Image (cartoon, rainbow, N blue to C red):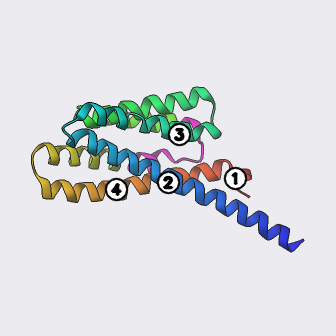
Amino acid sequence: MIGNFIRQKMAGYLRQAEVYGSMRRMWMESAFWTREAVCLPTKSESLERALTVPQVISGFFGDYYSDATVKQIEIALTGHMRAVINSAEDLKAHGERIIRVMTNANSHLNEGELRDHVEKFTRLSASWVASHKGGQTKAGIAAFDTLVDAATGLADYLSTNLIAQFNERFK
């Protein structure tokens, strides 16, 4: 009896670890492929690959949310990634769309906390792109390292709240 309880608990912890690991990997890929789309001379192939990341991230949420919500997440993330790559002026609006879609989907997300994570990720993404386009290699490397930290912070925040929202699946 105690053995079954322990096995069930361990299985729940493993499912949680999978969520954290998957979410971190996807947001790291977002940072990496955004970088590649900006840096590589073969931009079209890199951009094409970069734009698959929002599909992967939104697809991950397909196990939890409706198809309509998943599509909204994909549209918001794709718009954000395109805006970062193109150094668009409306980055904040794209970030707000992500916040709105995610907080509508998950009541456990605190809008202010999510905004802090998304704005940090957005600000550091834009800073990195500007450093790279300006030929500031050393500053660009430092900005990318900080961007990776922001990506994992955002991933962990989303994971924690997804697990809280669907707690029964992780017991």
Left/right of residue 12 with respect to residue 92 in the rendered view:
right
Q: Mark 1 against mark 3, which lies toward the viewer? A: 1
Name the amino acid, label 4. Val
Q: Earlier in the sequence, mark 2 or mark 3?
A: 3
Q: Mark 2 against mark 3, which lies toward the viewer? A: 2
Determine which of the numbered discs, if any, sits on residue 103 in the image. Answer: 3
Q: For the residue carrying disc 4, how many other residues have a C-alpha within 10 Å: few (<14), some (14-19), or many (20+)?
A: many
| Residue 44 vs residue 76, the one in the foreground | 44
Determine which of the numbered discs, if any, sits on residue 157 in the image. Answer: 2
Determine which of the numbered discs, if any, sits on residue 167 in the image. Answer: 1
Residue 106 painted magenta:
yes
Name the amino acid, label 3. Thr
**Dominant secondary structure (helix, strand or loop) of the stretch shown in magenta:** helix
Name the amino acid, label 1. Asn
**From mark 1 to mark 4, how far is it between C-alphas?**
28 Å
Range shown magenta = 104-118
- Please name the residue shown 43% across and 31% down the image: 76
